[in-house]
Structure formats: C-alpha cells, structure tokens
Image (cartoon, rainbow, N blue to C red):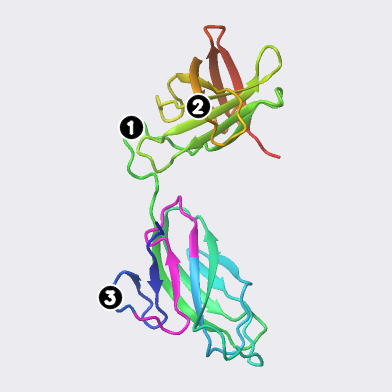
Amino acid sequence: MKSPIVWIAVAAITLFSVGEANAQLTLGAARLYPANPTSADVLTLGVDIRCDEKGYIGNSYRVNMVQNNIIVRLGERRADLVFPATCPLQLAEELEIGRLPVGNYTLTVIKGAAGTSPSVTLVNSAPFSITNARAVKPPPSVRLDYTGQWWNPADPGSGLFVWQDARDPNDAVLAAWFTYSGDGKPQWFVFQPKWASSTSTLPADLLQTSRMPSLTIPPPNPTTTTTSGTASLDFTNFGTGDEGVFTVTINGGATQAIKIQRFRP
C-alpha cells in the first residue's frame, strides 16, 4: 500500500491530503511524501511539469538547507527549447530529499538553475514538520538504533547482522551471528533478545536451523530448529571506543564476551 501524499500547491502554498475531493493542481504543483513524515522516513518530492512549459530539462537537481528551510533547485530551464506536441499532459519527477531530524521546516522549490533563463519559484517556504519515529516508547526507551553490521576485527570471517525496528514500541531486535564451528565449518545462528535497559538486552535463545539438501526452491524438506545456547547484546559503552559486547554461550559451554564494533569498509 502506497503512502498517502501531501500536495503543495503553488497558488495557495498549503498542505492537504490527496484524498480530498476535487483537489486542483496548479501549474508546477509539487507533492511531498509521506504525508506525515517521521525521522525514520526518506522524504521525497514529486514535481509535475506541464507540456505547455517551454524548455524544461529535468533529471538534475540540487538540495541544500539554510537554517531549517529546505531549498530544492530543479534542472535547467531554457526558452529556446520546446516540448514536442505529443508529450503527455504531465511529466513527473521524483526527487529524494533524504531523512531529516525531528523539527519544523519549510520547503522552497525553484525551477531553473543559476545562469539560465529566469528561475520560477514553484513553492515558497511551505511549512512542514518531522515527528519522532521513536516518540511513544514504554520504558526502557532505547536511545539509539543499532541496526547494521558488527564484528571483531581480530576475528575476520565472523560477525553479526543486527536489525532493530525503531518504530516498534519495544524496539524489536533480530540478530544473525555468522561464525565457525570447532571443525572449521561455517555456522549461522539467530536470536531475538528483549531490552533489559536502554543500552543492553536480556539473554535470548540462540537458534540454529538446518534441513536436508534439495534441488528445488522452496525445498520439500522441513526446516529443523535447534536451541543451541543463549546470546545477548550490550552497548552501554557505545561511543567510548568499546562500542559493544556480544555475550554468547553455546551448548552449555563457557560463556564468551566478544567485543564488537560497527563494520566500516
């Protein structure tokens, strides 16, 4: 299901839902979506270009911010070029603005790059807000998003993939650990810990899956899940150099506390 769209009309410079009846688009109208952007969303700007406009060359654009005013400059506009008579009624461009921190902003859209024919302001300081995707959280509220690839540089070939859902009320986490067994064969484990505090998790079951080989996808053979131990994550010292600790116990053996850091190429 597509996100709802907010239309920014040039004439009125107001925001309203595309679901409103008889919404009229003026020449050069733009849309900003999703309609209620949060700090977890990638903000996108859509711009419609009418066929009766002369000499608009799209595809290039620049985005910069002066204080909290987002300024988008669209591609070159030249009076010596015209659209062919067979062009569609609307030519649409989708421009990625990116993720923004929580706060109040304005949007200005200018058509025509510097040094070409006179530019046209399509949207002039239209207000919008970015809300906090993590605003409504029961304790413990997790302070950071730890999604990413983690490893210990002293142990190449093994590491952790961590996925954290910042929109989930409990900051749900799924982690996959890839490592090697005692006989040197690669192994994969997964675990889904719950948070004990804002920076560390409780131990969770460490699961390993297996199935008989098959030439078909999906395979006809069932997948077997085995609980192989426990695992937890601790980011209490994040930002001090020791970014995290991955604690794991396999099959009742000795507990290992492995220092981990974000992987950076």
Q: Position of residue 163 (x, y in %)?
A: 50, 36
Few, some or many residues within 10 Å of mark 3 (<14, 14–19, 20+): few
Q: Is residue 38 magenta?
A: yes
Q: Quadrant of the N terminus?
A: bottom left
Callout 3: SS: loop
- The secondary structure type at the circle numbered 2 is loop
Magenta part mainly helix, strand or loop?
loop
Front one among 4 and 261:
4
Q: Which mark is residue 21?
A: 3
Q: Position of residue 200 (x, y in %)?
A: 46, 25
In the image, the segment drawn in magenta is: 24-44
On the image, numbered disc 1 is attached to which residue?
139
Name the residue at the top extreme.
253
Q: Nearer the viewer, mark 3 or mark 1?
A: 3
Whether 88 is among the magenta residues is no
Q: Nearer the viewer, mark 3 or mark 2?
A: 3
Query: N-terminal of the two: label 1 or label 2?
Result: 1
Say few, some or many: other residues with alpha carbon within 10 Å of mark 1 (under 14 / 14 to 19 / 20 or more).
Answer: few
Dot 1: element: loop
Identify residue type, mark 2.
Thr
Image position, residue 179 (x, y; %): 64, 22
Q: Residue at x 62, y 90 (%)?
A: 82
- The quarter of the rendered structure image containing the C terminus is top right
Q: Identify whether 45 is placed above or below 90.
A: above
- From the viewer's perspective, tell me whether residue 139 is left or right of residue 105: left
- Residue at 50% of width from left, 21% of height from top? 224
Q: Which residue is mark 2?
A: 236
Res 215 → quadrant: top right
Instruction: Judge the density around disc 2: few (<14), some (14-19), many (≥20) Cα neighbours within 10 Å.
Output: some
**Is residue 240 something that shows in the picture?**
no
